[in-house]
Image (cartoon, coloured by chain):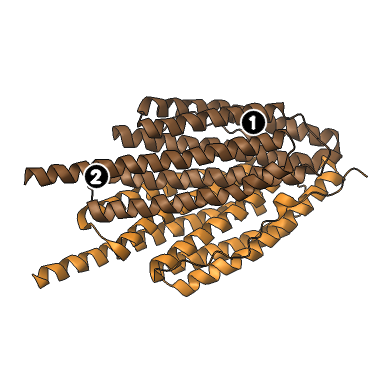
Chain colours: A orange, B brown
Amino acid sequence: MPDESRHILTSFEADLGRLRDMIAAMGGLVETELADATAALLSRDAVMAARVVEFDARVDAEERAIEQFAIRVLALRQPVADDLRQVVAALKVTTDLERIGDYAANVAKRTIILNEAVPAYPLASLAQMSRLVQENLKSTIDAIGEADPQKAMAVWRADQMIDDLYTTIFRELITYMMEDPRNISACTHLLFIAKNLERIGDHATNVAELTYYAATGETLPDNRPKGDLSATYMPRTDT
Amino acid sequence: MPDESRHILTSFEADLGRLRDMIAAMGGLVETELADATAALLSRDAVMAARVVEFDARVDAEERAIEQFAIRVLALRQPVADDLRQVVAALKVTTDLERIGDYAANVAKRTIILNEAVPAYPLASLAQMSRLVQENLKSTIDAIGEADPQKAMAVWRADQMIDDLYTTIFRELITYMMEDPRNISACTHLLFIAKNLERIGDHATNVAELTYYAATGETLPDNRPKGDLSATYMPRTDT
């Protein structure tokens, strides 16, 4: 029955397209969440930050909806080989996007409490870091929607800049804390905010790897220059 | 053909059992990794810490092996309904276990660099926190192996104690930094170590939720008292 088998193939392609669209839409929600969290941080806007924390529930709901749809596709279409791997990759991508949403919500939570303190540190580097992360996240979401492996690879490469900037900010914040202990608690929250941005960059990179794999069937090489050096930073303070 | 269908059913049960065993084994690796990372931290043993960082590659390899096996089970057995959800849950559990391994490796990385500094903070509370996290992780792995929903629920409940202890440690570390700025960089690494332990606790809870769901088909309620209050901690420093 060649006609029926063609029909089944087409339906599966349509399901896969819908799955990609759902993931791109979830990616759009996460992009908005991160952009708003950053805007709230930079403008010291606690009301906006509180809205971001609430918004995260929509991202979580979207993850569950995509998961249910993916499970239905697996059950009804019973895909094998490459098709199966694409659905499994989609399930993994939603986990990464959900985590990105969590990190953005945590930035917002810390923004609310930071507003109770005197500004401790010029936010320009954090603003720049967030801009890079947002660009990478946007390219990642575009790469999913367009199933574009080249775009995915560009994201994977660009993450190094984010890691470098994170290491710089980490060092600067430690210096600010040392110069004036009154900065310590605010700078600690800023450290965690920077760490959240760095983690969002990593998750965007994961998504890019999964997108590359889903589009080409090949994995990206393991030798991406891995870059968060802050875990090995220790200034001499005993002099 | 009742005989053949019974045969297929039994093979799928065997696959599911093997999947559970593989996950429990990966869980065992992660337990060892966390125990060793903690021991290295407490005994200031940089050599042991370096071994933990290397060990993490085995955990990552195990994740890939489980994923490949799960994809093969999906392709060959084409499970539906509850059976399908169990395989999908297994895929998600390995993602959580892999992240736990990453956090343990990060504890070890920071331990290596902490050994270059003067001890800045009594590690007793961190030792206690790690003990709780390790107990919870162990119960989680046992719950997977035994497919025991009651054990999974106990883990889910116990995470609150870990969150409370994290909040206490966070406050103590901020105080130590304020008292003596020479403590700042070491205490910052300890802050991230405590945060890593808290995140490991969260991932163990995720795994417990997935295990409960896989065993009962029901989700745990949403109203678990969520407890990391450190993101909203801001002492008054402007007096």
Is residue A46 visible from the viewing direction of this image?
A: no
Report which residue position mark 2 lands on: B12
Whether labels 1 and 2 share one chain: yes
Q: Which residue is at 66% across, 54% downward?
A: A42
Question: Which residue bears the numbered disc 1?
Answer: B167
Q: Look at the image and tell me in which quarter the C terminus of chain B lies.
A: top right
Q: Nearer the viewer, residue B129 or B166?
A: B129
What element does badge 1 sit on? Answer: helix
Relative placement, left or right, of A116 versus B202 is: right
* Mark 1 and mark 2 residues within 8 Å of each other at the beta carbon: no
Q: Position of residue B211 (x, y in %)?
A: 38, 35
Q: Is residue B58 above or below residue A21?
A: above
Q: Give neighbour class at mark 2: few <14, some 14-19, many 20+ (Cα, 10 Å).
A: some
Q: Quadrant of residue A213?
A: bottom left
Q: Secondary structure at mark 2?
A: helix
- Residue B201, given in percent of the width and then of the height, sits at 54, 35
**Disc marking residue B152:** none
Q: Name the chain under label 1.
A: B
Image position of A110 with respect to A22: above or below: above
Q: Tell me the amino acid under the disc marked 2.
A: Phe
Q: Above or below — where is B96 with respect to B145?
A: below
Residue at 76 percent of width and 42 percent of height: B114
Distance between the alpha carbons at the discs numbered 1 and 2: 45 Å
Q: At which x and y percent is residue B137?
A: 51, 33
Residue B180 in sight from this viewpoint: yes
Q: Of marks 1 and 2, which one's residue comes earlier in the chain?
A: 2
- Decide which of B1, B92 is in the foreground and name it: B1
Which kind of residue does numbered mark 1 sit on?
Thr
Observer-side mark, 1 or 2, equals: 2
Outermost residue, right side: A239
Question: Residue, x 71% and y 31% (percent of image)?
Answer: B171
Tell me residue B78's x, y (percent).
Answer: 23, 52
